[in-house]
């Protein structure tokens, strides 16, 4: 049977994501963390600015603070009567004909409304000579121009970035309420799997998926439990799933999700829980069971290593973000000219691995990363993007535009 023949019975990734959206409710439980622990956590309560930012008018330049009423005939000369340092304001008040030496971040002295950059003046003793074309009311940072007191500083839900931590700190906020961590357990299934450190006997391979998953789940929003390797044995998988469902929000398994005689995941999920969907029209990663065991969400990922990564990134990540209350789940995708010929049958959406580069004129170019088998880790290890091909697309000729999704912001 060709890919096209059976693909009508598979659901699209968008249908799967819709199904997940309907099945998941965001976690509402909160906890308090401080700024040292808050990076990448999801803000649960909006933060209000306790005071104006900036709290006082200050200079954005090293220069001289003066009153624009003194700009009559240019050039002109003012008398320097003091210094306003950052953190040590000038305590007097400017009178007509006077100016104050000022540094970046220092309070604008009372009586001044403008700052001139020090590069633009000449000084002799305390006489400061201003040039022609002096502009009034320049180089001042005004009270509240960044954020007004009582305005929203950060709106929940939001995954906190380094910039957000700086914003909170500048408002003197050290602790925030965030969504509690998602508890995620995962395991591998397969009689062929051996642990690193053990000698391989005939037919065995090392379990790589749990290491990949450990890395993919390395996120301060998750608490993860590695449940190890479970044999291709119904009773063992059954017991493991029921126990893990009691203390986790999400369980992820790899392997055993397909239709082989040793693939029990779907059958067990049917027995002890609920299957929402099972087969997706994507490549790599067709068998992907999503459902629920008691109050725990379950993802039965395929066994092939590249399928694990692709289904995790294209499906599971969205579900986890949604559990955290985040709705901005569209991955960054854009067009690039593909300089390789790509083989593809119509039927499934494909996430081929590519190597993306940017030409000097800014144009994006991509080539295939090599062999596309879902067991081939080495080619994917050289890749830095997915080449995203629609279900309908067939072979791609070199020189054609394709859609790419970079793995990271660095190529
Ligand atoms: P399965 O989905 O169980 O039929 O597995 C599909 C393929 O992925 C087989 O070649 C398995 O040997 C391989 N595989 C399954 N689990 C793992 C794992 N944890 N690490 C590496 N390869 C795996
Ligand atoms: Mg297996």
Image (cartoon, rainbow, N blue to C red):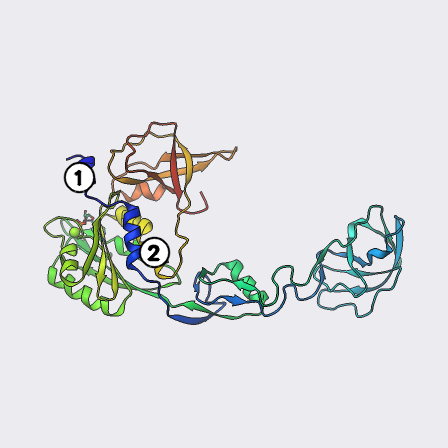
Residue 174 point in image, percent of width and height: 53, 70
12 shown above or below 182? above
Residue 65 point in image, percent of width and height: 79, 59
Residue 8 point in image, percent of width and height: 20, 40
Q: Is residue 97 left or right of residue 5?
A: right
178 shown above or below 328? below
Some atom of ligand 1 lies within 8 Å of the CB belonging to the residue at label 2: no
Q: Secondary structure at mark 2?
A: helix
In this rendered view, identify the residue nearer to me: 216 or 316. 316
Q: Quadrant of the C terminus?
A: top left
Q: Give the number of the disc on residue 345.
A: none
Q: Residue at x 86, y 53 (%)?
A: 71
Report how far apart the C-alphas of labels 2 and 1 lie in the structure.
34 Å
Q: Give the number of the disc on residue 6.
A: 1
In this rendered view, identify the residue nearer to me: 189 or 406. 406
Residue 173 point in image, percent of width and height: 54, 70
Residues under numbered marks 2 and 1 in contact, where contact means CB atoms less than 8 Å apart: no
Q: Give the number of the disc on residue 215.
A: 2
Q: Quadrant of the N terminus?
A: top left
Q: Is residue 255 left or right of residue 315?
A: left
Q: Is residue 196 left or right of residue 108?
A: left
Is residue 198 visible in the rendered image? The answer is no
Q: Residue at x 31, y 32 (%)?
A: 342
Some atom of ligand 1 lies within 8 Å of the CB belonging to the residue at label 1: no
- For this orientation, the residue located farthest to the front is 22
């Amino acid at each position: 049977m060709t890919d096209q023949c059976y693909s009508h019975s598979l659901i699209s990734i968008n249908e799967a994501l819709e199904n997940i959206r309907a099945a998941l409710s965001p976690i509402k439980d909160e906890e308090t963390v401080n700024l040292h622990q808050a990076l990448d956590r999801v803000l649960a309560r909006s933060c209000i600015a306790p005071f104006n930012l900036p709290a006082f008018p200050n200079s954005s330049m090293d220069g001289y603070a003066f009153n624009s009423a003194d700009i009559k005939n240019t050039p002109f000369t003012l008398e320097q009567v003091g210094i306003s340092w950052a953190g040590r304001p000038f305590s007097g008040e400017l009178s007509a004909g006077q100016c104050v030496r000022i540094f970046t971040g220092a309070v604008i002295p009372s009586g001044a409304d403008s700052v001139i950059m020090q590069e633009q003046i000449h000084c002799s003793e305390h006489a400061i000579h201003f040039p022609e074309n002096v502009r009034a009311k320049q180089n001042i940072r005004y009270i509240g121009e960044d954020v007004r007191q009582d305005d929203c500083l950060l709106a929940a839900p939001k995954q906190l970035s380094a910039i957000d931590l700086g914003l909170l700190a500048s408002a003197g906020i050290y602790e925030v309420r965030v969504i509690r961590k998602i508890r995620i357990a995962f395991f591998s299934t397969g009689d062929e799997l051996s642990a690193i450190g053990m000698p391989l006997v005939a037919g065995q391979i090392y379990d790589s998926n749990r290491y990949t998953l450990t890395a993919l789940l390395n996120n301060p929003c998750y608490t993860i439990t590695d449940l190890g390797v479970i044999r291709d044995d119904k009773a063992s998988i059954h017991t493991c799933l029921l126990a893990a469902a009691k203390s986790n929000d999400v369980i992820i398994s790899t392997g055993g999700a397909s239709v082989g005689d040793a693939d029990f995941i779907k059958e067990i999920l049917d027995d002890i829980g609920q299957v929402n969907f099972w087969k997706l029209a994507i490549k790599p990663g067709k068998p992907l069971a999503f459902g629920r065991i008691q109050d725990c969400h379950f993802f039965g990922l395929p066994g092939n290593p590249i399928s694990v990564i692709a289904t995790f990134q294209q499906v599971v990540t969205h579900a986890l973000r949604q559990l955290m209350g985040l709705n901005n789940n569209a991955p960054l995708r854009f067009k690039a000219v593909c300089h390789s010929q790509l083989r593809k049958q119509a039927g499934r959406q494909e996430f081929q691995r590519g190597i993306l580069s940017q030409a000097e004129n800014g144009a994006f170019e991509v080539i295939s990363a090599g062999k596309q088998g879902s067991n081939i880790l080495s080619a994917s290890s050289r890749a830095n993007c997915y080449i995203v091909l629609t279900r309908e697309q067939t072979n791609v000729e070199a020189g054609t535009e394709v859609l790419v999704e970079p793995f990271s912001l660095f190529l």
